[in-house]
């Protein structure tokens, strides 16, 4: 299964330079890196990133992260993938822009 992380472009660029993404401020505060499934990622974008420009969506095969992924209940009791540890940027299968339209809605690439 592929899981997805939404983050600002500059944050990902810093991660690429370092070789790992250690998480956003929210991730660090929560103690894990938040990911979403394909079924969850659009709602995540609308709820937490509404109207924000210059975002990226990063696709990562869950299997590339081994046992560091834990599926835990979150929004509405759904199980969400949480990464306990840094995200090696080399595990990303792709990274694509997540632009917004004139109404501030995100225009997702093909997932």
Image (tube, rainbow, N blue to C red):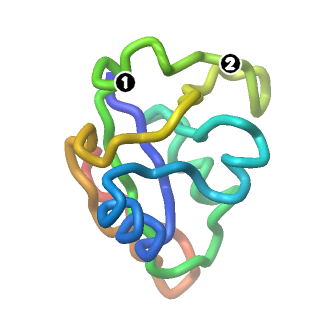
Locate residue 65: give its quadrant: top left
| Residue drawn 35% across the image and 70% down it | 13
- The residue tagged 2 is 72
Under circle 2, the secondary element is: strand
Percent x, y of residue 68: 49, 20
| Residue drawn 39% across the image and 60% down it | 15
Labels 1, 2: front one: 1
Q: Characterize the local packing of mark 2: few (<14), some (14-19) or many (20 or more) Cα atoms within 10 angstroms.
A: few
Residue positioned most to the front: 18
- The residue tagged 1 is 65
Percent x, y of residue 10: 44, 76
Q: Characterize the local packing of mark 1: few (<14), some (14-19) or many (20 or more) Cα atoms within 10 angstroms.
A: some
Percent x, y of residue 30: 76, 40
| Residue drawn 41% across the image and 73% down it | 9
Q: Considering depth in this image, is 65 or 1 the residue closer to the camera?
A: 65
| Residue drawn 39% across the image and 67% down it | 98
Locate residue 82: give its quadrant: top right
Would you say 59 lies left or right of 77 here?
A: left
Residue positioned most to the top: 67
Relative vertical location of residue 96 with respect to residue 94 in this rendering, above or below: below
């Amino acid at each position: 299964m592929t899981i997805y992380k939404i983050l600002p472009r500059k944050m990902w660029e810093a991660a690429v330079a370092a070789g790992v993404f250690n998480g956003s401020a929210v991730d660090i505060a929560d103690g894990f890196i938040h990911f979403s499934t394909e079924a969850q990622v659009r709602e995540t974008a609308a709820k937490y990133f509404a109207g924000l420009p210059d975002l990226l969506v990063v696709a990562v095969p869950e299997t590339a992260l081994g046992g560091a992924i834990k599926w835990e209940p979150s929004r509405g009791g759904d199980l969400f993938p949480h990464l306990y540890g840094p995200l090696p940027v080399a595990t990303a299968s792709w990274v694509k822009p997540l632009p917004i339209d004139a109404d501030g809605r995100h225009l997702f690439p093909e997932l």
